[in-house]
Amino acid sequence: MIQDVWKEEVLKDRLMALKKGQTTMEQENQEQLLQAMLAHIGSTDSELRDTYIYGSFYEWILEKNLLDDHHLTELWGYSLNHLLFKGIEEKESDWVFTRSFTSLLVALILARDLADDFLSKGDIEDCQTKLLAYVKAEKDVRGYVPGKGWAHSVAHVSDAIDELVKNPKSLKTAYVDILHALWSIYLQPHYLFIHDEDERLLVPIFAMLEHGLAQKEVIHLVQQMPLTLAALKEQLNEEHYRMVLFNSKTLLKSFFIQTTHQSQYAALHQSIVTCLHEIY
């Protein structure tokens, strides 16, 4: 799909002109514009990436519905097949911005499909497989990167999975695997989550509970947390163990707050209370 691509400065000028109303989508070469946006979706220029590329996708896909099914399907295929795993094997490289903002684009297209139903069941199942694989493979979980802005891969893929779960064409049989993959993010020992990742990660977990995930599956993970932490304490050095402990407490406390006074989650809430008492 991507061939001769505009440079970042050219793309920024075009998108800026569109936002200011100095030109319209009808006056633009949409193919060339969308190609450039995909090529630079992970730009380290945070204004171009966040405000102009993602902001424009959000406006065109969700607010104004300016992209037809053909363009949306092209964006969808290229995102999942060429961008979502870009540079996944590299440690803390700038490719994380491409992967992270690609997952946000996937979330937007999934939300549009919920309204317009242009993706096939096979498309949704393929997305489910790839998002699950991506969650398991992504090791760069940085939130804010100085000088470059928000990477926030955990928060962004959580948004994508939330939209996936709400789609009636998704497979409920994959929920347990998705739950375990999301939960495992908080057991990584190399990064402190301090940018509300816990709140974003809980959104798709609650969505799965609302769409058929058995509460006992989540309760089991919560009940296993003290044993999991005890095992990690034996395997990790003090610094890395403290990171896992901090992250786990943060996640559980957010879970505690969100299940308080929610009668449908009474059993889950009690398991969280018990777990917090055990690990403090």
Image: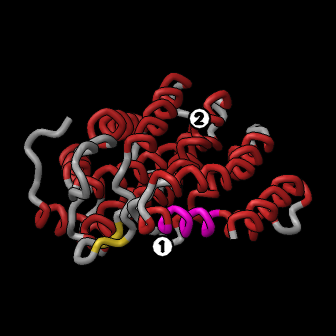
Read off the residue under disc 1: 195
Read off the residue under disc 2: 177
Q: Tell me residue 92's x, y (percent).
A: 25, 58
Label 2 is placed on what type of residue? Asp
Q: CA distance from mark 1 to mark 2?
A: 25 Å
Residue at image x 55%, y 69%? 246
Residue at image x 56%, y 65%? 245
Residue at image x 39%, y 68%? 143
Residue at image x 73%, y 66%? 276
Q: Earlier in the sequence, mark 1 or mark 2?
A: 2
Residue range (magenta) = 242-251
Whether residue 177 sits left or right of residue 63 in the image: it is right
Q: Is residue 224 magenta?
A: no
Q: Quadrant of the N terminus?
A: top left
Q: Tell me residue 107's x, y (percent).
A: 48, 49
Q: Looking at the image, can residue 120 be seen?
A: yes
Label 1 is placed on what type of residue? His
Who is closer to the viewer here, 129 or 121?
129
Q: Tell me residue 164's x, y (percent).
A: 57, 41
Extreme residue in the front direction: 234
Taking 169 as reference, is 247 above or below it? below
Rendered image: mark on residue 56: none
Q: Quadrant of the C terminus?
A: bottom right
Mark 1 neighbour class, 10 Å CA radius: few under 14, some 14 to 19, many 20 or more: some
Q: SS at mark 1?
A: loop
Q: Tell me residue 120's x, y (percent).
A: 52, 25
Extreme residue in the top direction: 122
Whether residue 37 sits left or right of residue 60 in the image: it is left
